[in-house]
Amino acid sequence: MKISEIATLLNAELYTVNHDTMTDIKSACSADLMSDVMAFSKENALLLTGLINPQVIRTAEMMDMKAIIFVRGKKPQEAMIELAEEKRIALMSTHYPLFEASGRLYQSGIRGHGF
Amino acid sequence: MGQMIIRDFDIPANDFSVAGEASSTVRKLLSQLGVAPDRIKRTAIAMYEAEINAVIHGRGGKAHVEISGDKIIIEISDEGPGIEDLELAMQEGYSTATDSIREMGFGAGMGLPNIKKHADELVIKSEKDKGTVVTITVNF
Ligand SMILES: Nc1ncnc2c1ncn2[C@@H]1O[C@H](COP(=O)(O)OP(=O)(O)O)[C@@H](O)[C@H]1O
Ligand SMILES: [Mg+2]
């Protein structure tokens, strides 16, 4: 799925412009603990999380992820948006909770790689 | 890449917002040098874990990076409290991180094992009350 299609599906607000609009996202990882993302996630292009701080963006960067969705309506601060723009990572915010957002993506064919 | 490339970074203490800057810069540099993506990812993960450790456990420190044609050597050093029992620290799940660190998304006790997994060579020298030096080598 394209980033814009994911945003539509999750009714999400998209905060960044400088990201790969054509990238085809096939897999995702949902976690609040960045330690777990670092240790267990493999080749996932999308991160769903309830955690909101700059290290979420850093973690996504190190893991070669293309997009981050903050769940439960959490909104990133300006500094985080700037950091994400610089790293060409898309930032989105959805009102769905983590389980619900993950389930909707799974239903649309997104899978998880890891463990 | 005939010549060795050397970079030095400060890792500020207690500034969680910039933790990862050094790893990010090295990641970008390796990409510009045309290093294979899976090698870059290994390097980035290992260095970021060590950098985060220096911030959250070591009161900040320094990173010294040497890149040659066939490998990268990363030395992350701090003058923090040191690791008393290295064997214990290397175990998955062992962590002395505080609740405030966990609230930031870290402190699962997976960092050192994760560095070991991604590095081709890992050497840790640590002395109680003196500090810690973590040396990571990734072959290209
Ligand atoms: N640079 C360091 N200085 C002091 N102690 C450290 C350092 N790095 C790691 N440690 C110790 O080793 C433990 C395990 O580290 P790690 O596996 O990265 O897990 P975590 O960082 O999640 O606690 C830490 O909780 C800490 O007690
Ligand atoms: Mg750690």
Image: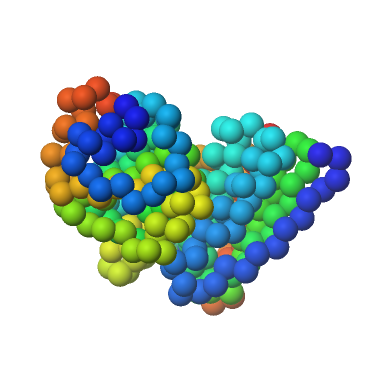
The quarter in which the C terminus of chain B is drawn is top right
Identify whether B81 is placed above or below B77. below
- Residue B110 appears anywhere in the view: no
Relative to the observer, which residue lies in front, A67 or A39? A67
In the image, B37 versus B92, the foreground residue is B37
Q: Residue at x 70, y 45 (%)?
A: B72
Which residue is more in the foreground, A1 or B13? A1
Q: Position of residue A105 (x, y in %)?
A: 22, 31
Q: Residue at x 67, y 47 (%)?
A: B29
**B76 w.r.t. B118: above or below:** below
Residue A39 appears left or right of A69: right
Q: Quadrant of the N terminus of chain B?
A: top right
Q: Residue at x 46, y 74 (%)?
A: B14
Q: Quadrant of residue B119?
A: top right
Picture coordinates of residue A78, whole percent (x, y): 37, 63
Front residue of B57 and A32: A32
Name the residue: 50% across, 65% down: B18
Left-right relation of A60 to B61 = left
